[in-house]
Amino acid sequence: MSRSRSVLLVGEGNFSFSAALCHLSSEMSVTATCLQPQEEAMRQEGAFNNMQIIKDSGGKVIFEVDSTKLGECASLRGHLFDRVVFNFPHCGRKSGVKKNRQLLKDFFLSCVQVLAEEGEVHVSLCNGQGGTPADQPRRERHNSWQVVAVAAEANLILSDVRPFESEKYQGYKCTGYRSQDKGFHLENALLHVFTRSAPFSCPPVLKMEETVEGEKVQYDIPAELSDYMTRCFLTSDSVHPVKLVQDFLLERLREKSVVSMVTEALPVLLSAKQLQLCCPDIDHTLFYWIHACQKKMKAEACCNTTEELKCQVSVSSKPANPAVSCKGVEGMRSLSTHDVDLEEETALYILRPSLRPQMEALIAKKAEWTEMEYQHVNAENSLNWSLLGISGIVFQNIPVNYWALPVFHELLFTGLLLKKDEPLKVLEQTLGCLLAPYGVSAVTEQEGLHLMAQPMGLIGKVLRSSTSDNNLFGVTVSLNLDLLAVLMFSLPDWRLLWSPDPRFLQQFVLRPAPGTPFTTYCLFPELYSFDISFWTGTAWENKKFHALVREASCGTVEHIKLIDKFSHPDLSQTSYCYRLIYHSHTHALSHTQALQFHKRLEELLSLRLDVTIR
């Protein structure tokens, strides 16, 4: 190695483990500590010889070091260690799980003060104590030391669990708690390796400016979406799994067709008019409606008053004047008979729920993609397929649930194919063979095909459309790249795709083939359940509630369930009680942090939705 690793050992008894480490590797700089004074520690059998081995190897031995107050130890001040080791921590005697759990928590909070940024914390526990699925048999949670939960309080995640190989450490003798002669049972003992977690960050306020139908529009991104907006997964040099999946699909499809990908940047904002005809199958109640902060208007703009251009944030603003209308919005009302939110009725723009409107605009600009040109291409093309493709992020304002993605990357293809080639059947066979190994099945629907997978459900569509030429068949293929990445790399949670932790992308640097399972760096994350109850008026804004949950929890709530609803007969008030499940595969989520998120949610609900917390 280029440099020696600095190792701090705490809670040592006879220093036999520290001495064994010095024997194992000369590349370790060992600092061994114990709680006892020197005179008491020297009484342990073999302690003097072990300390001499440590010193002869260039290591240090320090006495009277409290493992729960490492930051206060003068001898350790100014030193950062690559590894901090605590073997078989115990409060002593019949102290019970609660006291030992507190000991672990205090140790973790203490050791991060002397731990290097990329350092590891090694904690060895007897079988069953940790309370993780790695323990066999596994104790009931209340009877374990809940090692993952207490480590999370210090922003540490469990990154590895492996057997504690006592035979590997020559001369090691476990002395038990407080250096007593009675040692711990080492059979099936486990070594738990902890690392630092990326910190949580509050969603920033993000302002955007884009050109929509020739007009420059400034607008605010909804707070719960802001962390998704600055990520670039699909650049040419990206090794993100979403990009790897797209490359894999393009490579396979190009074996059977000519696929041209459009690489130009496309605005994420659409006008209501742009969606009027392009996406009749998309539920408009799931749109993210956006109000412009500022807008440079054309003379022929559809709005009649400047009042409509006032700055509003779609998540937190009050409903606008219901009397204000816009032709583009009126056109959207024909898509559904359902009533819409007053704020939505006055919104002029929508975060794109699909790339189809922009695909149609691209085709209209490109003469080479007219029906006549398709006939020419197909006549010259032995593969008989010609497809135009685009990809990018799209948005859906959906309730919080396990597989509810408010943002994902869509890969969209469109083409005019010869009817005699039975393109829908060929696409079903092609996509079926390509995706079946990953659990995807094709289901025939009236409008085309649905691509389904468990447990997430719909991951793609193949839509057909009529053309003016009876010999041609129009098809549009829409694929959810994020869910396909989850399937193809066996990710436990779609939110991992957005992880800021560099260890996530490190596994994809060598561009592994789809089917290579992801190895998580955050093992057995704890989940926490909290209930929230409040009174509100009769016009309850459910979508805004879910948006605030995402914002307040930094995306850590993975499921919301309505468990009670009561309407007061006299006060025109309704009481709601929801159960929220907090869970994260990307960060160290502690009980304390989850509770802070929950308290923040209560504050935001009171401020923005004018509810009364019960």
Image (spheres, rainbow, N blue to C red):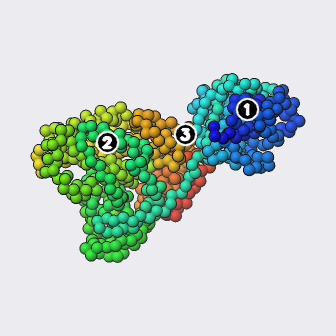
| Mark 1 and mark 3 residues within 8 Å of each other at the beta carbon | no
Residue 22's disc is 1
Give the structural element (helix, strand or loop) at label 2.
helix
Q: Position of residue 482 (x, y in %)?
A: 40, 45
- In the rendered image, which residue does mark 2 sit on? 250
- In the rendered image, which residue does mark 3 sit on? 521
Identity, as a three-letter code, of the amino acid under mark 2: Leu
Crowding near the residue tagged with mark 1, few <14, some 14–19, many ≥20 C-alpha atoms within 10 Å: many
Q: Position of residue 252 (x, y in %)?
A: 30, 37
Quadrant hosting residue 454: top left
Identity, as a three-letter code, of the amino acid under mark 3: Tyr
Residue 265's disc is none
C-alpha separation, residue under disc 2 versus residue under disc 3: 30 Å
Q: Residue 149: in sight, yes or no?
A: no
- As rendered, which of 539 and 6 lies closer to the eye? 6
Foreground label between 1 and 2: 1
Apparent side of residue 521 relative to residue 17 in the rendered image (left or right):
left
**Nearer the N terminus, badge 1 or badge 3?**
1
- As rendered, which of 224 and 414 lies closer to the eye? 414
Q: Position of residue 395 (x, y in %)?
A: 38, 53
State the residue at coordinates (53%, 43%): 503
